[in-house]
Image: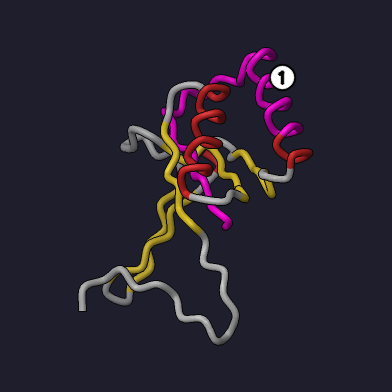
Amino acid sequence: MKFVSIYKTAETGARPAPEEMARMGKLVEDGTKAGFLLAVEGCMPSANGARVRLSNDKVSVTDGPFIESKEVIGGLAILQADSKAAAIELVRQFLNAAGDGECELRQLFEGGPDVQAPCTANA
């Protein structure tokens, strides 16, 4: 099973300390070698970004920084795990290395043309 872990944290504008970067680098290296970390990316500050929204057929663009947000997306990882519980454990290990914040964990849809996507909406 594949999962995406979206890391959200308060944006401080400060660069990570060398110790934090080394700890994260080791986690990424170990996870890649072990085969459970398929991809990982960190995000630049929200000042470099934009929010693009469609509402009532009108597109609006808001340039960063997103000061009204308490938390912003700091990065994401694609994980390979045998179960949701195993993926949660991988995310716990990440948060122990990354520090304060939260991860939204979502299983990725993996199906061919004959597989229907799971439906969670009420009919």
Q: Work out whether residue 83 or residue 27 is closer to the camera in this orientation and state it.
A: 83
Residue 6 position, x and y percent, is 49, 44
For residue 20, above or below residue 35: above
Q: Work out whether residue 121 or residue 71 is closer to the camera in this orientation and state it.
A: 121
The residue carrying mark 1 is 22
Residue 85 falls left or right of residue 79:
left
Q: Is residue 6 magenta?
A: yes
Q: Quadrant of residue 17?
A: top right
Q: Quadrant of residue 23?
A: top right
Name the residue at 44% across, 23% down.
100
For residue 110, above or below residue 29: below
Q: Is residue 22 magenta?
A: yes
Q: Tell me which amino acid carries mark 1.
A: Ala
Which color scheme did the rendering employ for the protein? secondary structure
Q: Among all residues in the image, which is located at the extreme bottom?
A: 114
- The quadrant of the rendering that contains the C terminus is bottom left
Name the residue at 35% across, 68% down.
54
- The quadrant of the rendering that contains the N terminus is bottom right
Q: Among all residues in the image, which is located at the extreme left?
A: 123
Q: Quadrant of residue 36?
A: top right
Residue 47 position, x and y percent, is 51, 38
Mark 1 surroundings within 10 Å by alpha-carbon count, few (fewer than 14), some (14 through 19), many (20 or more): few
Bounds of the magenta span? 1-30
Residue 90 position, x and y percent, is 55, 36
Residue 109 position, x and y percent, is 51, 67
